[in-house]
Image (tube, rainbow, N blue to C red):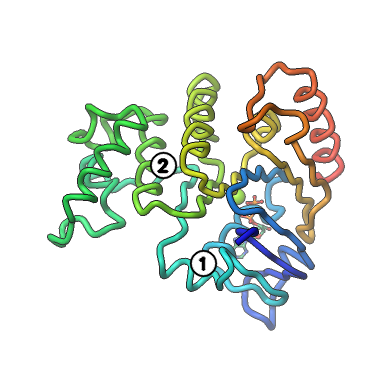
Amino acid sequence: MTNAIEASRLDVGYGGRQVAVKVLSGLDLTVKTGSFLSILGPSGCGKSTLLRVVADLLDPLGGTISVLGDTPHAVRSRRDVGFVFQDSTLLPWRTVRDNVRLPLGVGQGSLTRKIEDRSEELLDLMGLGGFGGRLPHQLSGGQRQRVAIARALLGQPKLLLMDEPFGALDEITRDRLNDELLNLWRRTGTTILFVTHSIAEAAYLGERVIVLAANPGRLVKDLDMRPLKQDGNRCTREDPAIVAAMAELRTALERAS
Ligand SMILES: Nc1ncnc2c1ncn2[C@@H]1O[C@H](COP(=O)(O)OP(=O)(O)O)[C@@H](O)[C@H]1O
Ligand SMILES: [Mg+2]
């Protein structure tokens, strides 16, 4: 399978077919399997809406979309999609460990040894090795987002949807988590759709960056970052080619706003 997402003439709105105001209109988007796509766009242009359609949380009004070669619904049923949102909703009364295991049925006596081991591995991987027994309020914001990422990865999703996951974090923490995310992506080959407000973050992470404009949401810029980076999507934040790409993205974003 070469494409993780194939969307064609996609129309998306809220309020049903009758009263719908289109949020996305006629969107064509193909995303290669295993790639890292960054999505930029002004607030309200439909970035989260697009992820909702991919995740089968919202049906399109028109057009077609296939995810991992199947319907969004089938992919969701197979738990092939993981999500991380800006404000990760951890259950405050559950430990970090139990929050990570939650999607696979904690408390139902159904946890296999394999899942238990894997959740511990993921906590280690996210730098939370000693934190499994803590409660969410005993963690920093960055640590809570790491828990959310570990939770999203537990089911070994083929597709990871990230909606401004690091938006609430300080810059140093964000940079560090960006590098951890890239390492993880290199190791797992998971396709990642990453929505962000940060041009720098989009350019640093993405093999490709798209910019959406609002009213209705549509694609206004599609930048291939691979020629600007080393193998494995590697670059430095200060690389002149990356800085130039950021300026190009900024122009597109200003026009789109
Ligand atoms: N549940 C909803 N019901 C009605 N309108 C919504 C809903 N969610 C989002 N919208 C509207 O859809 C548009 C796109 O929203 P969203 O996808 O959240 O934008 P973004 O993530 O790019 O900031 C906005 O105008 C927003 O007000
Ligand atoms: Mg949003």
Residue that appears at 79% across and 59% down: 215
Tell me: residue 5, above or below residue 16. Answer: above
Disc 1 vs disc 2: which is toward the camera? 2
Q: Which residue is mark 2?
A: 149
Please tell me how crowded label 2 is: few (under 14), some (14-19), or many (20+) other residues with Cα within 10 Å: many
* Relative side of 244 to 97, left or right: right
Determine whether the residue tagged by mark 2 lies in a helix, strand or loop: helix
Q: Residue 31: x, y in percent? A: 67, 55
Give the quarter of the figure containing the C terminus: top right
Q: Residue furthest bottom?
A: 18
Q: Position of residue 49 (x, y in %)?
A: 62, 59
Q: Measuring 79% from the left and 67% from the top, which residue is drawn there? A: 26
Q: Amino acid at mark 1?
A: Leu
Q: Which quadrant holds the N terminus?
A: bottom right
Q: Quadrant of residue 250?
A: top right
Vertical side of 134 occupied by 48: above or below: below
Q: Nearer the viewer, residue 75 or 99?
A: 75
* Local SS, label 1: loop
Crowd class of label 1 (few under 14; some 14 to 19; many from 20; radius 10 Å): some
Label 1 beta carbon within 8 A of ligand 1: no
Q: Is residue 60 above or below residue 107?
A: below
Residue 57 tag number: 1
